[in-house]
Amino acid sequence: MREAVQYIGWLVGIPLEILVIAALLRGPARRFPLLLLYMVVLFLATTVQIPAYTAYFSGGQLSHTRAFYYWSSAAVLQLLVFGVVVSLIYEATARASRRRPMRAALVAGAIVFAAVSFLIHYDSRVVPGAWMTPWSRDINFVSAIFDLALWALLIASRQKDDRLLMLAAALGIQFTGEAIGQSLRRVSRSLVFSGNVLILLANLACLYIWWQALRAAPARRQRGVTTP
């Protein structure tokens, strides 16, 4: 069953990743370059992991273990999705009167938090998963907080940006699904599968919403009036 869910995830996820990248390359990539970078790395990480997982499921061996590929890609992707959230907030503050100090504080705070959390949890004496799990949890937690701040900022803005709202909402779904899924996996071994399925569905939902947001023509609304 676990293998079937993983293969279904690839069959649905890889086409969605390609669709999001294609939608970005049609124009939005200039506005969201870090999102494009995240998607390209996600696609490459997925394709690299397929042989490792396939060999693991069939009992074969590769030069590196499945855990090596998983944690290596997870570290990079966790930082990139954190960067995506920061970049979206950076974009949302384009019209703020004090945007320069606000942006500088945002970027500096994000870098310091990620570095401090890494230094606290990193331990070369144990397997990567032992210190990567709490570090990823910290990054995911602060990413979710930043995403909530972004959502509040966009809702409060007089000029609504539907595309940014959809991108932020998709991230919120992903962060929430991952948080609940990880909690289920820690509660009981019998809930590990359910947690994995929830995390997969949340990630696929995020990709689908991103695709829909990026493929549509951007619309900005001010005082309830929609303009192209």
Image (cartoon, rainbow, N blue to C red):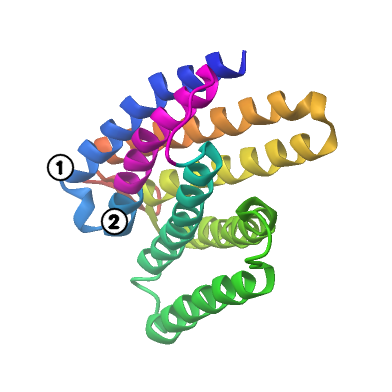
| In the image, farthest residue toward the left | 26
The residue lying toward the viewer, choosing from 52 and 175, is 52
From what the image shows, is residue 45 above or below residue 61? below
User: Which is nearer the eye, 211 or 182?
Assistant: 182
Q: x and y percent of residue 107 in the render?
A: 45, 76
**Residue 41 covered by magenta stretch:** yes
- The answer to whether 9 is drawn above or below residue 158 in the figure is above
Residue at figure coordinates x 46%, y 81% from the top left:
102
Q: Which is more toward the observer, 196 or 91?
A: 196
Which mark sits nearer the N-terminus, 1 or 2?
Answer: 1
Q: Residues within 10 Å of mark 1 (few under 14, many from 20)?
A: few
Residue 56 in percent (x, y) is at 52, 26
In the rendering, at what x and y percent does residue 131 appear? 67, 59
Q: CA distance from mark 1 to mark 2?
A: 12 Å
Tell me the kind of residue under disc 1: Arg
Left or right: 58 in relation to 223: right
Instruction: Give the SS element for disc 1.
Output: loop
Q: Find the magenta span and give its range.
A: 39-63
Residue drawn at (64%, 30%) of the image: 196
| Location of residue 86 in the rendering, given as x and y in whole percent from the top left corner | 45, 65
Q: Residues within 10 Å of mark 2 (few under 14, many from 20)?
A: some
Query: On screen, 223 above or below 8?
Result: below
Is residue 217 in view from this perspective?
A: no
Identify the residue at the far bottom of this view. 101
Image point (39%, 19%), residue name? 11
Question: Is the residue 11 above or below the residue 73 in the image?
Answer: above
Which picture quadrant has residue 141? bottom right
Q: Give the number of the disc on residue 32.
A: 2
SS category of the residue bearing label 2: loop
- The residue beneath circle 1 is 26
